[in-house]
Image (cartoon, coloured by chain):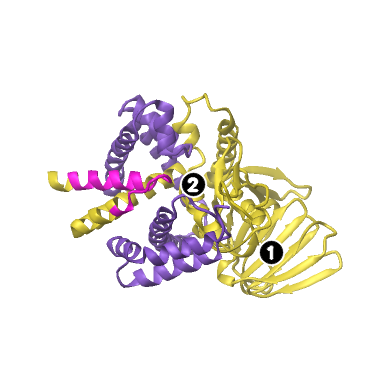
């Protein structure tokens, strides 16, 4: 069968492609933590159940990318969580939560306006890929366009939404 | 911003858009682009931050309703969406004016009811300085005045309690009382099944004739009203960790992992044939759109997770031999 010793396969791919993965982690800003992160990846691969993977190297790159994203993300949530605790300590009522919810709703409306100003296809692509969780390849197929045009549509959407974010950040 | 800086951000956005998709495989090209100039990494991370900002907005319970309202041809997801919107509306009202659903109790005290929809999380600050964070699909109620009594109807909540020896904080879940002793603890209720985990301090579990003292890292599980109480150990830091967008698992079956993921993404996740009994120890990040949560989880859990419209299903990858 195809998956005789798949976990070992994944680990041996990791060993064989170690320089490439390390190079990627360094380029991604891991600096001296790159080795540690690769070690973490090694352990995760070791505990994963047996599995044949179509493209093991891409899997490993994806997992490395996710480690970098998760690290950045959890730093941000820790800071945010501490910030929220201060708010609770200062005024333990629910108004700030409610205000935040109102602000979020207002922002969503502006997101919708921003997207619809970019034309129906950008709007549909954004909704399919980012709200409904359809992969970009599948969205391209469904809409009968190339993957690259789907990517450019999303790029357009994020460019416009970045301006919206910049506007809020300045407020 | 100079034209050059704008162009760089645009290029960076194209890379993040591509790399965020589960089918992306041009990793060496990305590496080369990042290496070409130190400014590229900074731009890439800035573009990722933009994505995270947008994704956070999309996590809002009304996101689908506001952004998806002209879009009607997809039957299955709409059910979820309507429900999310409705649940979100209720909880939103709760947080704005702290009125939510005010129920008159026999003795005239008012109960505030707070509810979250699937995939939604909400934090409630109580009058005594304690805080309750509701995970998705959770309903609880508390007394409007003396809010040291909380009733968990169903779902999961993390309690961060300001302890008072003379006035213990009590969580009621069906026939069970959980009494704090200076505490951060997590309660998951599904029907009459219960799981209580303690992060800090201690909790006293009381049901019928059982009385159990729980310390940090203790996890109590009970399968039903008359189910046997079982104690196990967890890393205290992992208790209620769904609150920071991360789930920790220790030798959990994928059937259990699926249940936690369902709660996080707001759509049922099922363990398919031959998968439910596999075990996983490790961490899963649960922030971002569901497809990204699943794409990240796949290589870690070693399964393929497919969206069949109504559910996400974990499957052994094609051609797996066991």
Rendering colour (chain A): purple
Start and end of the magenta stretch?
Answer: B7-28
Taking the spot 52% from the left edge, 66% from the top edge, the residue there is A46
**B218 to the left or right of A29:** right
Q: Is residue B263 above or below residue B164?
A: above
- Graded by Cα atoms within 10 Å as few (under 14), some (14 to 19) or many (20 or more), the crowding at tag 1 reads many
Q: Nearer the viewer, residue B188 or B147?
A: B188
Residue occupied by mark 2: A98
Rendering colour (chain B): yellow
Residue occupied by mark 1: B196
Percent x, y for residue B98?
Answer: 57, 47
Taking the spot 50% from the left edge, 55% from the top edge, the residue there is B299
- Graded by Cα atoms within 10 Å as few (under 14), some (14 to 19) or many (20 or more), the crowding at tag 2 reads some
Q: Is disc 2 in contact with disc 1, using a CB cutoff of under 8 Å? A: no
Q: Is residue A78 magenta?
A: no
Percent x, y for residue B165?
Answer: 67, 74
Quadrant of the rendered image containing residue B212: bottom right
Q: Is residue B291 above or below residue B41?
A: above
Percent x, y for residue B61?
Answer: 52, 41
């Amino acid at each position: 069968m195809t998956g005789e010793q798949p976990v070992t396969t994944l680990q041996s791919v990791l060993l064989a492609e170690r320089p490439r993965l390390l190079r990627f982690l360094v380029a991604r800003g891991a600096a001296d933590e790159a080795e540690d992160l690769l070690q973490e990846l090694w352990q995760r691969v070791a505990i994963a159940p047996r599995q044949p993977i179509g493209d093991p190297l891409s899997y490993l790159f994806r997992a490395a990318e996710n480690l970098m994203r998760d690290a950045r993300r959890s730093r941000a949530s820790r800071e945010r969580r501490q910030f929220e605790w201060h708010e609770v300590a200062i005024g333990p009522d629910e108004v700030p939560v409610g205000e935040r919810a109102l602000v979020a709703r207002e922002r969503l409306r502006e997101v919708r306006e921003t997207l619809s100003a970019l034309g129906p296809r950008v709007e549909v692509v954004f909704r399919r890929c980012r709200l409904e969780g359809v992969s970009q390849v599948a969205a391209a197929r469904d809409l009968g366009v190339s993957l690259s045009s789907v990517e450019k549509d999303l790029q357009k959407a994020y460019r416009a939404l970045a301006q919206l974010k910049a506007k809020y950040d300045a407020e | 911003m100079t034209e050059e800086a704008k162009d760089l951000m645009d290029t960076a956005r194209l890379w993040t858009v591509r790399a965020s998709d589960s089918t992306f495989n041009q990793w060496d090209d990305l590496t080369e682009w990042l290496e070409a100039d130190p400014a590229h990494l900074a731009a890439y991370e800035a573009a990722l931050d933009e994505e995270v900002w947008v994704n956070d907005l999309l996590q809002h319970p009304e996101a689908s309703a506001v952004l998806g309202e002209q879009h009607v041809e997809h039957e299955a997801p709409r059910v979820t969406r309507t429900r999310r919107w409705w649940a979100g509306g209720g909880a939103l009202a709760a947080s704005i004016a702290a009125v939510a659903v005010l129920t008159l109790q026999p003795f005239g005290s008012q109960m505030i009811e707070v509810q979250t929809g699937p995939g939604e999380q909400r934090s409630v600050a109580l009058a005594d300085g304690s805080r309750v964070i509701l995970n998705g699909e959770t309903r609880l109620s508390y007394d409007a005045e003396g809010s040291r009594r909380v009733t968990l109807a169903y779902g999961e909540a993390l309690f961060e309690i300001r302890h008072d020896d003379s006035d213990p904080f009590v969580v009621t879940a069906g026939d069970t009382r959980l009494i704090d002793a200076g505490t951060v603890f997590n309660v998951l209720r599904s029907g009459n099944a219960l799981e209580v985990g303690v992060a800090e301090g201690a909790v006293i579990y009381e049901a019928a004739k059982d009385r159990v003292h729980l310390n940090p890292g203790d996890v109590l599980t009970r399968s039903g009203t008359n189910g046997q109480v079982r104690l196990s150990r967890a890393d205290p830091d992992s208790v209620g960790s769904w609150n920071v967008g991360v789930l920790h698992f220790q030798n959990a079956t994928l059937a259990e992992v699926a249940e936690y993921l369902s709660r996080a993404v707001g759509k049922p996740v099922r363990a398919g044939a031959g998968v439910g009994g596999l075990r996983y120890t490790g961490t899963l990040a649960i922030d971002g759109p569901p497809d990204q949560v699943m794409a990240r989880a796949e290589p870690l859990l070693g399964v393929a997770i497919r969206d069949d419209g109504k559910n996400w299903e974990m499957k052994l990858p094609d051609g797996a031999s066991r």
